[in-house]
Amino acid sequence: MTPAPNLPAEKWPQIKALFFAALDQPTGERASFLNRQTEQDLELREIVATMLDAHQREVSGFELEPTGELYPNRFGPYRVTSLVATTLSTLVLRAERDDGQFEQTVAIKLIQPSAVSPQILYRLETERQILATLNNPAICRLLDSGQLSTGQHYLILEWIEGVPFLEHAKLLDQRAKLLLFREICLVIESAHHLLIVHRDLKPAHILVTPQGNLKILDFGIAKLLQSNSHIDSLATQPGHSPLTPAYASPEQWRGDPATPSFDIFSLGILFAELLTGQHPFGTSPALPHEWASRIHAGQPQGLRLIKGDLQAIARKALEVNPSHRYATVESFRNDIENYLDSRPLLARPNSLLHDSALWIRRNRRYLIPLTILAAFTLFELQQIYLRREDQERRSRQAQAAARDLIFKVFLSVLGTNVPADTRRQILYAAIKQLEVWDFASQSEIDKREIATLYSQISGNLGESFDNYLEDFPVAERCARRALILLDSLSSATPDERWNTAMLLADILFSHGKWAEARQAYQEVLRRSYLLQNPQSIVNRRSRTVANSMLGDILLAEGHPEQALKIQKSVLEERRQILREGGDAIDSAPTTSFLGNVHYSLAQTYAALNLLGPAIHHVSESIANHTIANATKSSLRPIAEGLLLLGDLHKRNESSALANQSWREAERTVLAMLAKEPASIPAQKILNEIRARLVHPR
Amino acid sequence: MHLSRERSGHTLQPTALVHEFLLRINNIPGATFDLKAYFPLASSMMRRILIDHARSRTSRLANEAVAIDSPTGFHPALQSLSMEQLLTVDDALNELAAMDPRQAQILEMRFFGGLTTEEIAQSLDLSSRTIKREWTCARAWLLTRLQL
C-alpha cells in the first residue's frame, strides 16, 4: 500500500488541475501524460499518480458514479425507462412492466435515504391496504411499495397522463363544467365514505386523461397514525400539517383534526376557479401567511364574478365556519345537481343547515386523515417520524442513544448563530424530552446521562452572565434535579456533585434568592471538604468563588461589615494563590474573578459610605475585566462597573465624572446589544444607564 | 477495533433526529429558516455528533465491558471503518477543508448528510456536473489519505 504522501496545501490547485487534465486523457495515456507534465516536480507527480490510482479503485461506499446509486434499473416486474423529475428528496421515475403479464406504465417515487425513516415501510404497507379499498378508477392508485437494499423506500403508482382539469375545462360550456365538477365530487365522496380525507385538493392534483377520464392524484401517499391522539397531537402543532396555502381551509390552517370540511373548502375554491377562471381569494401571488390571512378574512371577492345561485353555492362551500359550510361533499354535489335541474338549493338562506359537527362526532374514532403529497419533502416525512408511541416500542438503548443525540443536537446549536429566543425554545423542548426520559428511565447509565444533560441545560439557562437566556426557575429546577440524581448515583464523583451544587447556588444567586443561595453556597463549601484533595489549588480557588458569593449575599441582606471581612479574605487568598504560582496572572478566569471581587468590595465600601476605597476598587474591577475582555467577552461586567463608578462619582459630588462614566457604560452596553440584540441583561443595564443620564441632577 | 453497526429495524438514523430538530426550529414563531442552508448545516451537525459519539464510545469502551450499540446512520462508506479510521476521516476532512472548502463540504454532505448529488447541487447552487466532478477529485484524495 502506497503511503499517503504529504500534501502541501499550496500545491492543491495544481494537483487538482493536473488530476482533471489527466482524467481527460484516455486511460492508457494518463501515466505518460502525467510524466510529461511533471518533469520538474516529482512530488506533484507522485501525489497525482496516487490519486489517479485511487480513482480506478472500487471501494464500497465510495462509488464514483452517483447516478448508479440514485436508482436501480428494475423494481420487480417494472423496468425503469426514464427519470422524470427530481426534488430535494424524491425522484420520480417512469417504468414499464415487462414480465409479459400485461402492459402497464407506472410512476415510481423513490425517496432518498436522507429523507426517510425505517418506519415508513410499516406505514406504507398499511397505506397500501387502505388504498386497495379505495379501488376507484378515478383515483391514482398506489400499486406497490417497498424498500431497496440501499434503504431507499419507493412507491409504485399508476402512471397518469393528463391535463389539469381547469385547463381541460376551459373548452367546456358551463353545464359541462358543472358535470365535470360533479364527477370530482363523487370521487371524493367515495373516499369520505371510507373515512379518508384527501386534505390537499388542488388543480394540479386533478387531471383529465386523453380518454376524458378523471384522475385524482396522490391520494393518501403518506398515512398518519391511526389513533386519535396522534391526529390531535400532529394537528395541534402549528406547521406540521402539510397544506397548500391557497387551497387550505381556515380550520386546516389552525391545525384542527382533519375532517371532510377540509376537502369541501378546497372543492369550493376549485369550483370558483372553474367558473371564473381565477382564484376567489385573490389573483396576485402571495406568501403562505398571506394566503392564510386572505382565507381567514373570509372575503372571497372573486365570487362576485359568479352569477346567481351558483354564487350562493360557492359561498356556502367557502364559509369560514365549517359548520356553516356544506356538511358533506354529497350535499355540495346535490346542490349542483339541483341547480342543473332547476330545483331549490340548500345554499339559499332559510334552508336547513346540516351540522357538520355531527359528522365529526359520529366518526371521530375512525377518521384516518391522509396527507397527500405531490412529492415527499424531508420535513413532511420527519413530522410523521419520532412519535412517542414509536419510541416506546424501540429498545431502551436505542432510546437512550436517540435522546443523547437529540440533546447533543440541541446543545450544539447553541454554539451557532441562532437568536436567543430560538435558543430558549430549543432548550425548553430539550427539557421536556429530558423529563420524559428521566421519568421513564431506570438504569444507572441513563440517569448519569440525564443528570449531565440537566446540568448542561441548566447552565445554559441560568448562566445569565454570558448567555442571555435567563430563565431562573427552570434552570433551578434542572440543577436541583441534576444534583438529586448525582447524589443518588454511586458512579458519580464528588467533583461532579460539587460542580452541580455550585451551579445551583449560582442560579439561585442570579435569581436573587438570597436565603436559598446562601444555603447553597454553604453547601458548596461543605462539599468542598469532601473532595479528594480539599487543599489543592483548584479546590481552594473554588472556595474563594463560593465565599465571594456568600459575601455578596451578606451584602444584599444588609450586613456590609461581615461582607467586607469575607471579601477581603477572598481577595487575599486569591492573591496568595497567585503568589504560589497557582494562577496565571493575566489569564481570563483569574482577571475576571478578581474583577468580580473588586466589584463586590466596591459595593460593600459604598454600602459603608467609604467612597474613596469604593472608587478605587471599582476602577480595579473595570481594569481587570478589560484585560479579560481580550480573551473572553466581558462587556457586561465592564458596563456594570462603569455604571457603579458613575454612581459613586455622583455621590462624591463629581457630576462631570459621573456622566463620563455613564456615557462610557452606555457605549459598552450598546456594543453588547450589537452582538446580541435580544439580551435581557443588556437591556436592563441600558435602562438603568439611561435613567441616570436623563436626570443629570 | 470495530464496533458493531447493525442496521436493525430499531435503529434511529441521526439524520432523522437532525431533521426533527430543525423542523422544530422551523416551527418556532419568529425564527427564520433557510432551506438551502439547511443541508450543509445539518450535515455538519451530524458530523459533529457522530464523531463526538464515536470518540466518546472509544473512551468508554476502554473502561467498560458493556458495549452499548452506537446508533447507526453512518453512510455505507463509513460503516466498515474502524474507530481509528473514522476519526481519521474527520481529520482528513479538516485537512481538505483547509485546501478546498467546497470539496470538503461536498464530502461532508455526502457522508454525514447522506445527501445525493442532486440534493447537494441544489443546496449549494451548483450543477450536478460540478458536484460529480468535485466528488471525483475529493474521493481520490480521501482514499489516498485514508490508505484504502
Image: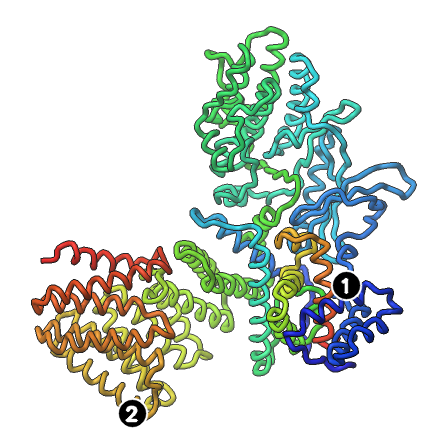
Q: Which residue is drawn at 84% across and 65% down?
A: A25
- Total residue callouts: 2
Q: Is mark 2 on a helix, strand or loop?
A: helix
10 Å neighbourhood of mark 2: few (<14), some, or many (≥20)? few
In-front residue for pair A545/A24: A24
Residue B72 visible in rendering: no
Image quarter for residue B82?
bottom right
Q: Is mark 1 on a helix, strand or loop?
A: loop
User: x%, y% of residue A295?
Assistant: 48, 29
Quadrant position of the N terminus of chain A in the picture: bottom right
Give the residue at mark 1.
Answer: A63
Q: Residue at x 74, y 64 (%)?
A: B136
In-front residue for pair B5/B130: B130
**In the rendered structure, which amino acid carries the disc numbered 1?**
Glu
Q: Residue at x 28, y 57 (%)?
A: A683
User: x%, y% of residue A582?
Assistant: 34, 89
Which numbered tag is attached to residue A579?
A: 2
- Which chain is home to disc 1? A
Q: Are marks 2 and 1 in contact (CB under 8 Å)?
A: no
Q: Which colour scheme is used?
A: rainbow
Image quarter for residue B9?
bottom right
Report the residue that reaches farthest toward the front: A40
**In the rendered structure, which amino acid carries the disc numbered 2?**
Arg
In-front residue for pair A188/A265: A265
Decide: is A109 above or below B22.
Answer: above
Decide: is A248 above or below A54.
Answer: above
Disc on the earlier residue, 2 or 1: 1
Which numbered tag is attached to residue A624?
A: none
- Which chain is home to disc 2? A
